[in-house]
Amino acid sequence: MADYNTEVAKVAINDIGTEEDFIKAVDSTIKNFDDGDLVEGTVVKIDHDEVLLDIGYKTEGVIPSRELSIKKDVDPDDVVEVGDTVEALVVTKEDKEGRLILSKKRAQYERAWGDIEKIKEADGVVEGTVIEAVKGGLIVDIGLRGFLPASLVEMRRVRDLSPYIGQKIKAKILELDKNRNNVVLSRRQYLEETQSEVRETFLSQLKKGQIREGVVSSIVNFGAFVDLGGVDGLIHVSELSWKHIDHPSEVVKVGDKVTVEVLDVDLDRERISLSLKATQEDPWQRFARTHVPGQIVKGKVTKIVQFGVFISVEDGIEGLVHISELANRHVENPETVVKPGEEVFVKVIDVDLDRRRISLSLKQANDSVDPASEDFDPALYGMPAEYDEEGNYKYPEGFDPNTNEWIAGFEKQREEWENQYAAAHDLWEQHKEFVAKELENAAASAAEDGQAPKEEKVEEVSNYSSESTSTGTLADSDQLAALRDQLLGK
């Protein structure tokens, strides 16, 4: 046993040399570096506020969480994993606590500057992820914090930048100043260069009068921009709606799919003028198509003038009741008959589509209905009615006049017809109530004046009158009695 111990002791003898030589040999295995040097190491531990990195030094380097990424307030676990090889910059070889402080962020920064300077010299393109939306623009991670002004994000000004966070984008480098740590990017310049050929081809194929599908990409005070497939066109606020609007957001919102007509293509300025209302029916034409002289419509008093009253009969459409058509008596002041905002029933006298004028009559509407009568003419209240050349009523598709029954398979047509009939009937009932109240008011006014109420005879002023005996109305068709009775529950 003693001999064995002696042999072991001989093997353990340091044959490197002196003790000083041994220390030098150990030191030679330790990496030498200075503050500001770039080093590479392996992640050996991750804490909530720091990462330990083995770089072959006598102690492990510490990367504080704030030095891990150019992003703010990051979780170390989201940046690195144990075993990752990481490049870091030596901040200080020994802080006041004797620790080796490293920075992954600054190493990335130093490395990125060299790459970005080369890209700038070559007039190239950088790619990075948007990590923040700040006042005036976006911060893009291109190895360092690149600033992308809001005015240079798209071909047009973008108001809401938040949707870009997390997106990968490409951009051109406008400014590069290492001393000021300033990098300014332009995505718009990149888009202009890459889309120039595409735009030229697209614009050359776009013709005035074409109908196109698009998506509303942004809204400004003077209109809305529509993406037609990589190229934007403008719908001016005056082309958004047939009616007056104060702001485009009353009609469309970002992301809406719209059908537009091309009004003009300016190839020199690369501008496209579009119209939304041109693809929609003019409400005046629709009114003229669905209303004929003699029909009763419900409206609201919008303006009272010396010569009469303006009535809104549909959204954006007004007609005039001349002062002579307000009442059967002489009227000096229209306000003695109606008030602003009051709902009234008027008869359509004339529709001048070219001049966009509608003549209405309040007195003829009141005279055309007897509140006590049960004679109902749906055509008088807007229900579509067609007649042949001989003046005979054309029954709705799917209705058999011989049996007064609907044919199986025409349920949709029946439902549509019944809905139209019910709407007209409801308007007739409202009109009767309105006239009844008007008569009550007239009687009360006469009583206050100490006068006996005058008996007013219902005047037959139109072929649409429920008292009319002329042909060509729904009211005087005996063959439709059964159909009307079904709807009225008789």
Image (cartoon, rainbow, N blue to C red):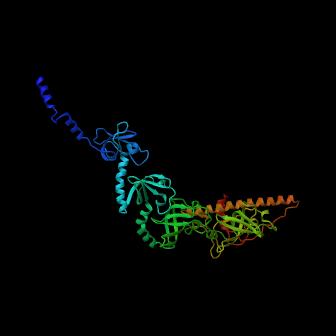
Q: Is the residue 182 above or below the residue 397 in the image? A: above
Q: Is the residue 96 above or below the residue 407 in the image? A: above
Which residue appears farthest toward the top when viewing the image?
2
Residue 356 is situated, as x and y percent measured from the top left of the image, at 66, 72
For the N terminus, the quadrant is top left
Describe residue 80's horizontal placement relative to residue 257 as left or right: left
Residue 115 is situated, as x and y percent measured from the top left of the image, at 34, 56
Nearer to us in this view, 150 or 399: 150
Nearer to us in this view, 460 or 78: 78
Describe residue 136's horizontal placement relative to residue 178 as left or right: right
Marker count (numbered): 0
Nearer to us in this view, 327 or 24: 24
Describe residue 80's horizontal placement relative to residue 353 as left or right: left
Which residue appears farthest toward the bottom when viewing the image?
389
Which residue appears farthest toward the left when viewing the image?
3
For the C terminus, the quadrant is bottom right
Name the residue: 45% across, 73% down: 204
Q: Is the residue 462 above or below the residue 257 in the image? A: below
Residue 338 is situated, as x and y percent measured from the top left of the image, at 76, 62
* Residue 387, quarter of picture: bottom right
* Residue 83, quarter of picture: top left
Residue 393 is situated, as x and y percent measured from the top left of the image, at 64, 71
Does any portion of residue 356 appear in the rendered image?
Answer: yes
Does any portion of residue 1 appear in the rendered image?
Answer: no
Nearer to us in this view, 431 or 271: 271
Which residue appears farthest toward the right when viewing the image?
450
